[in-house]
Image: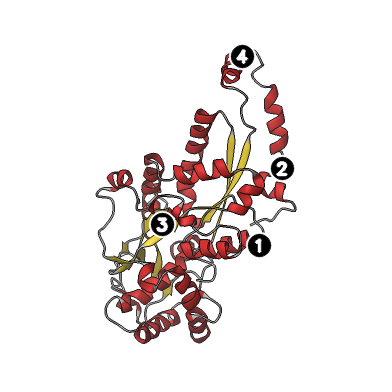
């Protein structure tokens, strides 16, 4: 990720202002398009907003963003451009807190939005500003295995084996890795085990992890392209997308019970008020619940959250029993207990490394 020296260059990039001025000379004042626009009144000035998201959403947003830009232009007459930045959710969250001027964040978990809120950039109550508590996608943890599944990996318990080399991302930088961690932990507690049992199990599994890639996409590359490991813990949507595009076909299993992965959307209040982009940013967030956007998410492997989206998803996803972050006491508790400084992940990391 490149950090540019000024807020304007961070958001717009070189040449945008010049191209906007140049566009004034195109078409002619007497053209039919110009006359039609004049009847509607003066159009708002072009705007650019920045979407900061996590790595595996890129394919979906590559489809959704142009659709929204065209829809907004048709409805309002205003030209907009949505720029985007992708990376590990933890790293992206840190970048926004440190000054990357995102107008909208679509990070991997609400726990990361909470961190941005705690930094004073997002107002409390953000989850109530959109449908479904501002969750736009769902997924679950998948086990990617080798052809023929030679290590016979189908359940969480199968990872508790020193002969099984596990690949998963680093929870400090990857939102997907935090979901994997919660899936591992909850597989014990949701089956009647104690916190002590879960801690022992998770510690053992991470002793079988040789490398900790920085995000979900790098974890996929480690397993698929570098051929490291016997099993990869990653988003279900990664496997589905790869099969749809023909990039690769790796067999995968969905363990049960599984963690329901909930992907949020939030407008960064401090930044949109500074940039004057609140109207566009809020409209984009709401657009992600439209049938066309939910279909794009489904087509790229995400489980939908709306009734219309579920019609597109019919027959495309395996049924699996799930538990949620609420079973751990919510994100405020999870951030502190599991991933905060000196939390369970830090303790396990020091022992497993």
Circle number at residue 98: 1
The answer to whether marks 4 and 3 mark residues whose Cβ atoms lie closer than 8 Å is no
Q: Nearer the viewer, mark 2 or mark 1?
A: 1
Could you tell whether 243 is left or right of 35 in the image? left
Where is residue 239 shown, x and y percent of the image?
38, 57
Where is residue 12 shown, x and y percent of the image?
67, 44
Circle number at residue 238: 3
Front residue of 43/73: it is 43
Q: Earlier in the sequence, mark 4 or mark 3?
A: 4
Q: Earlier in the sequence, mark 2 or mark 3?
A: 2
Circle number at residue 338: none
Helix, strand or loop status at disc 4: loop
Q: Which residue is mark 4?
A: 31
Circle number at residue 14: 2
Helix, strand or loop status at disc 3: helix
Helix, strand or loop status at disc 1: helix
Q: CA distance from mark 1 to mark 4?
A: 46 Å
Q: Earlier in the sequence, mark 1 or mark 3?
A: 1
Count neighbours of disc 1 (C-alpha within 10 A) and say few if under 14, some if 14 to 19, many if 20 or more. few
Residue at 39%, 41% in the rendered image? 290
Q: CA distance from mark 2 to mark 1?
A: 22 Å
The outermost residue toward the right is 5
Residue at 61%, 14% in the rendered image? 31
Q: CA distance from mark 2 to mark 3?
A: 33 Å
Which image quarter holds the N terminus? bottom right
Q: CA distance from mark 1 to mark 3?
A: 29 Å
Front residue of 307/220: it is 307
Q: CA distance from mark 4 to mark 3?
A: 47 Å
Q: Earlier in the sequence, mark 1 or mark 4?
A: 4
């Amino acid at each position: 990720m490149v950090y540019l020296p000024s807020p304007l260059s961070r958001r717009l990039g070189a040449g945008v202002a010049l191209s906007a001025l140049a566009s004034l000379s195109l078409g002619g004042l007497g053209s039919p398009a110009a006359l039609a626009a004049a009847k509607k009144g003066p159009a708002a000035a072009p705007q650019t907003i920045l979407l900061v998201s996590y790595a595996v959403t890129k394919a979906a947003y590559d489809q959704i963003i142009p659709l929204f830009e065209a829809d907004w232009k048709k409805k309002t007459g205003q030209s907009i451009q949505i720029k985007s930045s992708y990376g590990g959710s933890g790293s992206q969250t840190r970048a926004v807190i440190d000054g990357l001027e995102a107008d909208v964040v679509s990070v991997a978990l609400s726990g990361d939005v909470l961190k941005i809120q705690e930094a004073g950039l997002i107002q409390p109550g953000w989850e109530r500003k959109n449908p479904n508590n501002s969750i736009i996608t769902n997924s679950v943890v998948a086990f990617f295995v080798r052809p023929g599944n030679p290590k016979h990996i189908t359940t969480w318990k199968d990872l508790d084996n020193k002969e099984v080399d596990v690949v998963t991302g680093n929870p400090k930088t990857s939102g997907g890795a935090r979901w994997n961690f919660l899936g591992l932990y909850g597989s014990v507690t949701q089956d009647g085990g104690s916190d002590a049992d879960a801690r022992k199990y998770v510690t053992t599994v991470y002793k079988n992890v040789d490398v900790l890639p920085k995000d979900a996409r790098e974890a996929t590359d480690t397993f698929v392209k570098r051929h490291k490991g016997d099993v990869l813990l990653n988003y279900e949507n990664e496997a589905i997308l790869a099969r749809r595009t023909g990039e690769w076909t790796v067999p995968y299993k969905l363990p049960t019970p599984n963690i329901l992965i909930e992907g949020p959307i939030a407008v960064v209040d401090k930044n949109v008020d500074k940039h004057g982009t609140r109207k566009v940013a809020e409209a984009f967030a709401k657009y992600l619940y439209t049938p066309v956007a939910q279909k794009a998410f489904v087509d790229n492997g995400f489980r939908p959250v709306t009734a219309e989206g579920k019609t597109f998803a019919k027959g495309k996803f395996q049924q699996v029993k799930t538990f949620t972050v609420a079973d751990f006491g919510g994100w405020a508790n999870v951030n502190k207990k599991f991933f905060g400084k000196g939390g369970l992940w830090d303790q396990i990391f020091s022992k497993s490394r």
